[in-house]
Image (cartoon, helix red, strand yellow):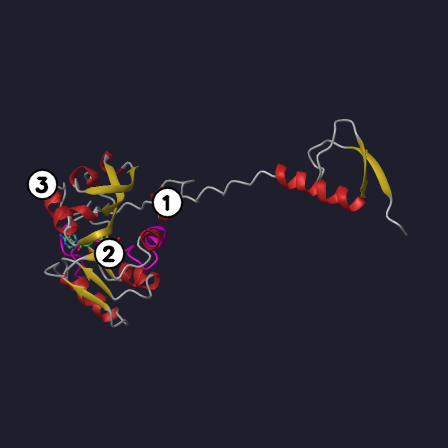
Amino acid sequence: MDKAKKKIKASGKCSSRPVVANECIEVTDDQIVSEVSVILSALEVPKPPPPPKPLDLFNKAKPLAKAIIPFQPYSYSHQRFDDGYLQPSGSTKEERYPKIYDSAKQLKPKAKRVLSFGCSTGEEIFALAKRFPNAEQFVGVDIDHNRIETARRSNKQKNIYFHDTLGGLGKFDVVTALNVFFCLEKPTPKDQWKKTLEEVANYVAPGGVLMIFKSDHDPAEALNDFKAENTWNHTHNRNNKEYFCGYYRKKRKFW
Ligand SMILES: C[S@@+](CC[C@H](N)C(=O)[O-])C[C@H]1O[C@@H](n2cnc3c(N)ncnc32)[C@H](O)[C@@H]1O
């Protein structure tokens, strides 16, 4: 069947030839379809790209500490305990801080060297090693040699090492100090705390990340050459003290 021809009042804009206003012209269905689609595509407004997702470093719905582990008070002492360890750390376990370990991976996905300062019996470094399968080296350091011996016995991986001193270990892309800066000595004198923090900070490579969970004083105050990646305060009622935590990225220009 012949295509129906229709008479329409030309708008002037969609016709392929110039037309006089109010002139009647003949057009086919195909012409109408193609001209309408030209108009529609011209009207289409491109959608803006979706905003980038922010790094979910912390569980924003809940305070970090609650999201990770409910606070369980224990008594602190420098005495040697029955098990021979210098400090109580019965709750040290491999997946104690999954959110922090995952954040380490997000912040430094290609980290080659990872250090756990105050690694205790090594669980923390084992958990981090799982998140960085392509890293070259993991080192756990703890002042308590007994803990280091236990960590070495539990270690099954050739690229994981344990030491009782920082020594000349070189620079690391990720350094964790979890539950360490709040228990150096009680009460933690600020100068001793600062000295230890600065020493540990020396082991962070340019562009590397230092992750601190719980500190008697505010690390952001002491680390002038560090840009706070994200900081938070966690207050709990133990000794009415405020404990500081944070992730810090070392600026490259200082090296
Ligand atoms: C409470 S434990 C935390 C262990 C582990 N990071 C965790 O969160 O499960 C603190 C550890 O830090 C170690 N530590 C304290 N002062 C230290 C220092 N100056 N150098 C190295 N390790 C230290 C202690 O021996 C202890 O094993």
Is residue 177 at all visible to an observer of this figure?
no
Residue picked out by circle 3: 191
Residue drawn where x is 21% and y is 46% of the image: 251
Residue 181 x, y percent position in the rendering: 19, 46
**Which residue type does callout 1 highlight?**
Phe
Residue 166 x, y percent position in the rendering: 13, 58
Mark 3 or mark 2: whose residue is earlier in sequence: 2
**Which residue type does callout 3 highlight?**
Asp
Up the image or down, 164 lies above or below 227; here it is below
Which mark, residue 58?
1
Name the chief secondary structure element in magenta. loop
Residue drawn where x is 24% and y is 56% of the image: 173
Is residue 194 at all visible to an observer of this figure?
yes
Distance Cα–Cα, label 3 vs label 2: 26 Å
Secondary element at image label 2: strand
Q: Residues within 10 Å of mark 3 (few under 14, many from 20)?
A: few
Which of discs 1 and 2 lies nearer the camera? The answer is 2
Residue 76 x, y percent position in the rendering: 19, 47
Up the image or down, 100 lies above or below 24; here it is below
Instruction: Give the side of residue 89 with respect to residue 130, left or right.
Output: left
Mark 1 or mark 2: whose residue is earlier in sequence: 1
Secondary element at image label 3: helix
Residue picked out by circle 2: 173
Instruction: Give the residue furthest to the top.
Output: 22
Residue 116 location, quadrant: bottom left
Which of discs 3 and 2 lies nearer the camera? The answer is 2
Secondary element at image label 1: loop
Q: Range of the magenta residues?
A: 78-102
Q: Do the CB atoms of the residues marked 1 and 2 lie less than 8 Å apart?
A: no
Looking at the picture, tell me which residue is in the foreground, 171 or 147: 171
Which of discs 1 and 3 lies nearer the camera? The answer is 1
Residue drawn where x is 79% and y is 29% of the image: 23
